[in-house]
Amino acid sequence: MKKYFLLTPGPTPVPPSVSLSEAQPILHHRTTEFGKYFVEVIENMKYVFQTKNDVLMVTSSGTGAMESSVVNLLSDGDEVIVASTGNFGDRWEKICQSYKVKVNKIDVEWGKSVNPKDIKNILDANKNIKAVFTTHTETSTGVVNDIETIGKIVSATQAVLVVDTISGLSGQKFLTDEWKVDVAVTGSQKGLMCPPGLSFVTVSEKAWQLVEKSQLPKFYFDWKKMKKSVANKETPFTPAVSLVVGMHKALELIKEKTIEKIWAENEKLSLACRAAVKSMGLKLFSDENVTCTVLTPVLMPEGIDGQKVVKVMREEFGISIAGGQDKLKGKIVRIAHMGYIDRFDLIVAISGLEIVINKLGYKIELGSGTKVLEEMLG
Amino acid sequence: MKKYFLLTPGPTPVPPSVSLSEAQPILHHRTTEFGKYFVEVIENMKYVFQTKNDVLMVTSSGTGAMESSVVNLLSDGDEVIVASTGNFGDRWEKICQSYKVKVNKIDVEWGKSVNPKDIKNILDANKNIKAVFTTHTETSTGVVNDIETIGKIVSATQAVLVVDTISGLSGQKFLTDEWKVDVAVTGSQKGLMCPPGLSFVTVSEKAWQLVEKSQLPKFYFDWKKMKKSVANKETPFTPAVSLVVGMHKALELIKEKTIEKIWAENEKLSLACRAAVKSMGLKLFSDENVTCTVLTPVLMPEGIDGQKVVKVMREEFGISIAGGQDKLKGKIVRIAHMGYIDRFDLIVAISGLEIVINKLGYKIELGSGTKVLEEMLG
């Protein structure tokens, strides 16, 4: 009988019409019927990515698609830049290291964003750099990076720009082609409002040229096989059929609303959430001018354990928000407002947060945050 | 309004209770609630695999789990045996080649099964073999391999035995531990009655010793990370949450029925299907004594194009069976009876086949196959 409220940075709630579409009888994946779903998903993903580049689909978590970027673009011993603003930026480094790719790491202080000039300096000094890996919205810290400026810098060089927009896409503005992103990576379970299990990459012409030279081993993640299959309205291996059908429905909902309206609504939720947090006497963890619109990172007051807050909210009230990761464990909580989240979901989360922090002994005026939300979102 | 009947060797029909369970609100994957589903899925998969070894879960097609076996067990330049009876056996070779693993290939004539002695001969002559890769039920040809005998041979050597039972598990008898299979690989979308998108591997102690020495690069497919996470009731990366919940339900259904009864029923369906095919005046493609119980491969009569049969059955009647692959394209059709398929599904498929082959100009007495099915399955 317990009610659940999901405001985590993935998975996110799935609209009922999407869930129901997934429960339809399973289609065989090499049929005209399924091919139509698949091709329309690919086409509509181009709209969401704002790209004319190829879009490829992988049955895996977003991490699988990140790894596919490394193994399809690079060769043993290649040099790259990883510009990391947190846990998910660091993942690029770990994947590269697994494949003996040499990483020039830009380690940004958690809570701040990448300084594009740092990327430019390395690229200017080192003409061997094959690729620059970074993150659009870094959910471990709540920061958004200036991909547009980074794109201008990288596109003027021989290197390709690879961006993890797993949590950002269809939440915060992202223009693959205009910003000159060669490879953008995303997953089904965030702004796309689907269950986890599917991921997507875009591949530019410049990126395909690297793919032709790439020597790193791959089989399941092989982009050339995927591209060939897309032309036949197929995937190389059995895809997650029910999730593709769900994605087809979710993309219809996104197109109907338009991506611009989704960006605007996310921003409105985000600004209201930040204001609510401040009116509760709490602070944002990240620099506000670089805080992303899909998640609000909230610094816990002295003496309040963020892990405990998350636990009590979930166990007592069924509200799932996220705690801090790694060095931020216990120090922050993260309220995600991406995908199928509306103003009242946010009111529930802030309401729960007010109650629980008070319960744990830190005095917050009850209703102070929700009042601001009602004012700003009503 | 069209009705669909799915008798392909994956995906297979999903029971309504499984589909509905997947439509439940999405749980966050690092919660007690989800952890409980996940751990029970792992435990129940041990029952289905008939193993006490570790079971690991991957969000990918079965092919991803096959690749995970290669990259976790081996190092650059290692030597292995691939005993292939068809298309899916050949996939082991292709994966190994992608990673520069040296393959000693046993190429069995399509329609026949592996002669275990051929494996023994290579193992006797070459003490460098690290692993033997083969297939339980080879759906491209309809053949089952004698894994029990192969297990006896391989277990007496330094090599590990890796078996693709993606289409066989929970359909045809498979005893991981008793048969001394070190690594068994399966997928969610066949005998397990779930949509595609999840795959599983079992890992024996002998296999873990190879894992410790393995040098091939991996990140998403890293078994050591998975094993560590299972201990915390988690997965290293966001799993396909809704599919795990569906799998949880499907495994309840399997346990309730018992795996032995499922094997017996599959065998009964299989024997009836073969008899029906013969009574229609058609022939099996594979040697009958090595034909698997999860799929019946039917040789098309002279002048009848199997691809056309499959197409007409699907387009006119909504019945999906499979055509031949590669060199068998057009020459055979394949009727799968694995997972959530009962006697009346089979009657529908055979009935459709009778009608369509007649339509295409080859005379079959209508009702000759279905009569046999009613006699044998009624």
Image (spheres, coloured by chain):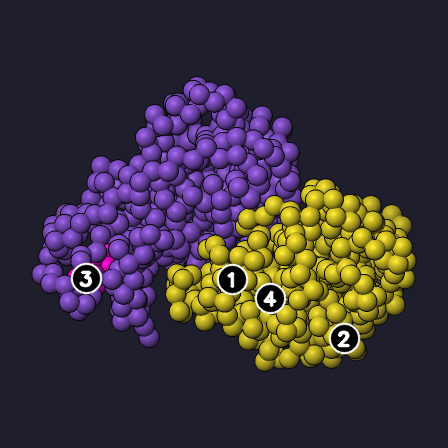
Chain colours: A purple, B yellow
Check the residue under mark 1 and report the chain it is in: B
Check the residue under mark 4 and report the chain it is in: B
Q: Position of residue B220 (x, y in %)?
A: 54, 50
- Which span is picked out in magenta? A345-354
Q: Earlier in the sequence, mark 1 or mark 2?
A: 1
Task: Give the labeled residue for mark 2.
Answer: B268
Pointer 2 and pointer 4 on the same chain: yes
Disc 1 to disc 3, how far (Cα)? 32 Å
What amino acid is at disc 1?
A: Lys
Check the residue under mark 3 and report the chain it is in: A
Which tag is nearer the camera, tag 1 or tag 2?
1
Q: Is residue B22 above or below residue A98?
A: below
What amino acid is at disc 3?
A: Gly
- Residue B228 bears which disc, if any? 1
Pointer 1 and pointer 3 on the same chain: no
What amino acid is at disc 2?
A: Lys
What quarter of the picture does the N terminus of chain B occupy? Answer: bottom right
What amino acid is at disc 4?
A: Val
Check the residue under mark 2 and report the chain it is in: B
Answer yes or no: is residue A158 visible: yes
Task: Give the labeled residue for mark 3.
Answer: A303
Indicate the secondary structure of the residue bearing disc 1: helix
Q: Residue at x 76, y 75 (%)?
A: B268
Task: Give the labeled residue for mark 4.
Answer: B55
Which tag is nearer the camera, tag 3 or tag 4?
3
Q: Earlier in the sequence, mark 1 or mark 4?
A: 4
What quarter of the picture does the C terminus of chain B occupy? Answer: bottom right
Indicate the secondary structure of the residue bearing disc 3: loop
> Which secondary structure dominates the residues rendered in magenta?
helix
